[in-house]
Image (cartoon, grey):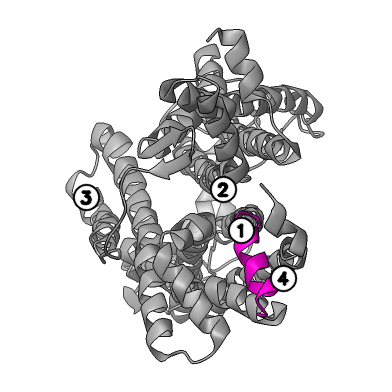
Amino acid sequence: MRPATLVRLALAGNRTDTTRVVLTALSALLASLAGLAALTVLAIPKPAGDAWAESEQYRNELLREPGLRGGTAFALLMLAIPVLALAGQCARLGAPARDRRLAALRLAGATPGQVTRLAVLETGLASLLGTLVGLGVYLVGRQLLHRPDERGRLALPTDVLPSTGALVAVVLGLPVLAAAATALMLRAVTTSPLGVSRRTVRERGPRPWAGLLIGLGLACFVAVRPLLYWVEGNDVVLGWLVPLLFLAGGLAAMIGVVIGTGWISHTCGRLLHRHARGASALLAAGRLLADPWAGSRTFAALLAAVIFGAGAAAQRAYFATQDQVEREQSRLAGVAADINPFYLSTMDLVDAAVAVAMLIAAGGLVVALVEGIVARRRAYAALVATGVPRATLSASVAWQALTPAVPAILLALTVGTMLGRGLFPSVSTGGSSTVVCDATAALCDDPATRDQYTRIVQIAEAERAIPVPLEQLVWLGAGALAAVLVTVGVGLLFLRVSTAADELRTA
């Protein structure tokens, strides 16, 4: 099959296929913007001078201080996780119709490898279109946002540009990654002239081995502080080992929670099947037992955002406790507290990033739930035709979404909080001395009179446990649950259309 024919067939299809391509391209666009923003932060050159020199051309301390840029870039890359999860949800949109189209191609003489390449090429081309548009948006936005203030300082690093290799790696790397992920997901799928089937069938439910990944993630975060004391002054080790622990620990915990949702779904399905009495709950139990991994696929982006938000809430609690303890110790010593609000104000930006991630995750939830309803529309229509009320089907959809969502959100909140507390279990401050001048500013600034009015004040050492940020966690969990409820409501709108009697005659 010629390459031009492959491209034409990959982009063929109905309106659902077009929607899938557009949503996949949009997801790739957002992911490329996050990656390009992170690379731009890392591309800021280190200013000349000593190790404490700052880039004074920026207004934000996150950009001025070289030591904070790595964390800023890491946070931007974390924003790409829910976007990539959204791309995975979009790739499943209209899967039954696509499977029938691929089966028709097999009937027309295409080989299994050719139809697999068609599916991979569709995802790769859609992602490439999104990354190219994302690169254009980045370059145009860089020019539009380059607005120095009266002091010549910039709000964003619009004066630097990542290397050409880095730009090419993002624009081409994301489509290659998306295509490879599609090929990996299709490894157990056989496309025959009679339809699409899977080679392997899971005979038993998921096992709770995801707890090992969660434990590994927590261990990585707990090991950061002892490592900082152990290799103090070794910039080479601190430059790669600590970021590696953060990345490995965060990814391990997130993957563990997402995979653990499959076990949660299967367990909830067993409990519902054993104890439920209503028809809607029993229908939901059957779906949860038949496909327990649907919860992992559906809630992946949302759970990643919840973990990140819970960890941010734990960090905010640490900074707030540190601020409070320093003020109390300074007041007891009789000196003015010199508190830097930088870290608490930075957490406001982190909270805004979490809100954006949850909005993106909510979009992925809508796509996943609607796709599941549309994919099973003939089964739903058959149930309605045999006398099952639509209200019962609506309740079963709600049961199927909310039953695994509630414990999964609680697990994500717990894991995120433990990650934050594992990094900073307590606050230690004080144990130092400071010089205080009890006179006017003129006398204190004059070297001839300053020594007459100065005294050395000892600030006692204090240690305090960090409280659990229950209020922030409740609000975060309520927001995640509200996203699930809104998604269920949107899905029920499609359920009524998908249960029409005409669907029984749909090929």
498 vs 93: above or below: below
Q: Please name whichever residue, 324 or 504, is drawn nearer the observer in this view of the structure.
A: 504
| Main SS of residues in magenta | helix
Regarding mark 2 in the picture, which secondary structure is present there?
Answer: helix
- Tell me, yes or no, if residue 330 can be seen here: no
Regarding mark 1 in the picture, which secondary structure is present there?
Answer: helix
Residue depth check, mark 2 versus mark 3: number of the one nearer the observer:
2
State the residue position of label 3. 227
Residue 241: percent from left, percent from top = 26, 39
State the residue position of label 2. 89
Q: Amino acid at mark 2?
A: Gln
- Residue extending farthest left: 230
Instruction: Say whether residue 487 is left or right of residue 191.
Output: right
Residue 16: percent from left, percent from top = 71, 41
Q: Please name whichever residue, 352 or 362, is drawn nearer the observer in this view of the structure.
A: 362
Regarding mark 3 in the picture, which secondary structure is present there?
Answer: helix
Residue depth check, mark 4 versus mark 3: number of the one nearer the observer:
4
116 vs 71: above or below: above
State the residue position of label 1. 365
Instruction: Say whether residue 204 is left or right of residue 306.
Output: left
Question: Which quadrant of the view contains residue 192?
Answer: top left
Residue 48: percent from left, percent from top = 49, 22
Image point (42%, 22%), residue name: 113
How far apart, in angstroms, are the residues tagged by discs 2 and 3?
A: 39 Å
Q: Earlier in the sequence, mark 1 or mark 2?
A: 2
Where are the magenta residues, as a range? 374-388
Crowd around label 4: few <14 · some 14–19 · many ≥20 (10 Å): some
